[in-house]
Image (tube, rainbow, N blue to C red):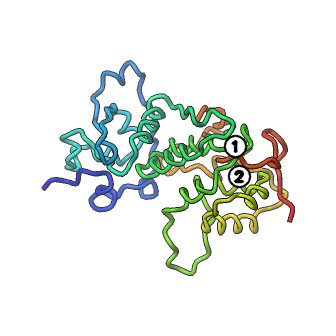
């Protein structure tokens, strides 16, 4: 029997791989010197409704996510393991090209980010893809970059960005208290908590996602008002935001935000980049 040929089918039916379900194991990008990598076999990833082909070295795909390593592993009898072809039909080619850039270089540089008002949506779309295929290292790099850019340019994501991030949240079916927002959601929430965004939120012509507003209110209610912005300390940043179910925790004391990766402008009264952490008055 032929196994499903799309990543979506693998996740939902035959091999529901997700970051939350996998066991702890070190998976690192770029596992071998480039001179050896270039001699290794390649797989074809067909992306988007037009099946735009991307040739990616199999060793790299294997190294960063169990989903790809399982799809290309003959032991699981997936069609991809014999054809060497993986289908990501719901992903935009530009987003996958950005992912491929990170995969080979570790860089999240982008022409729409190296400006005074960075286009956070580029990182948000890449984060959605990294989450979908379970690439923890990419997700963590994106969170670090969002913090770096927010501090450098004194900006935060736009109202439209919040809708994009929260759009896939499943409605709660229980009466249990809402959990604190984690991952990229937690990053955005804390930027709005600690940066001077009150004028932006009062005056922005677009509506804010109600689930984002709910999480923001919860965070404001629970936070210690004497607390400094958590992302400023590398150890705290790793603990509060990063995902490490398969990857090793960040090296303590190393500052991930120095890596070049991570809107509409916040507003004139936003705290200037590099200033003391701000706590809004009640």
Q: In the orientation shown, which residue stands out farthest toward the bottom?
A: 175
Residue drawn at x 58%, y 78% is: 176
Q: Quadrant of the N terminus?
A: bottom left
Q: Which mark is first along the chain, 1 or 2? A: 1
113 sits left or right of 49 in the view: right
* Label 1, residues with CA under 10 Å away: few <14, some 14-19, many ≥20: many
Q: Disc 1 designates what residue?
A: 150
Image coordinates of residue 175 in percent, x first then y, are 57, 81
Q: Is residue 64 above or below residue 167?
A: above
Between 22 and 272, which is closer to the camera in this rendering? 272
Residue 140, by quadrant, is top right
Binning the other alpha carbons within 10 Å of mark 2 as few (below 14), some (14 to 19) or many (20 upward) gives many
Outermost residue toward the front?
205
- Residue at the disc numbered 2: 191
CA separation in Å, label 2 and label 1: 8 Å
> Circle 2 sits in a helix, a strand or a loop, which is it?
helix
Residue drawn at (32%, 49%) of the image: 89
Depicted 171 relative to depicted 149: above or below: below
Residue 9 relative to residue 280: left or right:
left
> Residue, x 40% and y 45% (percent of image)?
92
SS label for mark 1: helix
Quadrant that contains the C terminus: bottom right
Residue 60 image position (x, y, % from top left):
38, 34
Q: Nearer the viewer, residue 270 or 242?
A: 270
In terms of image quadrants, where is residue 58? top left
| Residue at the extreme top | 35
> Percent position (x, y) of residue 251?
62, 38
Q: Quadrant of residue 33?
A: top left
Residue 252, image x, y percentages:
66, 39
Label 2–label 1 contact, CB within 8 A: yes
């Amino acid at each position: 029997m032929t196994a499903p040929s799309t990543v979506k089918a693998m996740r939902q039916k035959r091999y529901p791989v997700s970051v939350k379900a996998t066991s702890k194991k070190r998976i690192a990008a770029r596992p071998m010197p480039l001179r050896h990598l270039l001699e290794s076999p390649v797989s074809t990833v067909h992306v988007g409704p037009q099946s735009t082909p991307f040739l990616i070295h199999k060793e790299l795909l294997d190294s960063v996510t169990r989903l790809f390593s399982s799809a290309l592993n003959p032991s699981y009898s997936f069609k991809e393991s014999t054809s060497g072809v993986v289908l990501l039909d719901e992903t935009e080619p530009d987003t996958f090209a950005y992912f491929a850039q990170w995969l080979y270089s570790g860089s999240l540089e982008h022409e729409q980010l190296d400006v005074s008002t960075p286009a956070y949506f580029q990182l948000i779309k890449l984060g959605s893809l990294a989450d979908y295929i379970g690439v923890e290292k990419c997700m963590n790099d994106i969170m670090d970059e969002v913090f770096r850019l927010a501090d450098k340019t004194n900006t935060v994501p736009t109202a439209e960005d919040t809708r994009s991030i929260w759009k896939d949240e499943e409605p709660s079916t229980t009466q249990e208290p809402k959990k604190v927002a984690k991952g990229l959601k937690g990053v955005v929430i804390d930027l709005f908590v600690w940066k001077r965004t009150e004028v932006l939120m009062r005056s922005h012509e677009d509506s804010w996602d109600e689930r984002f507003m709910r999480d923001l209110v919860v965070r404001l209610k629970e936070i210690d008002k004497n607390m400094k912005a958590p992302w400023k300390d590398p150890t705290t940043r790793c603990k509060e935001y990063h995902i490490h179910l398969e990857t090793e925790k960040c090296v303590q004391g190393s500052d991930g935000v120095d890596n070049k990766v991570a809107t509409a402008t916040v507003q004139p009264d936003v705290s200037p980049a590099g200033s003391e952490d701000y706590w809004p008055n009640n």
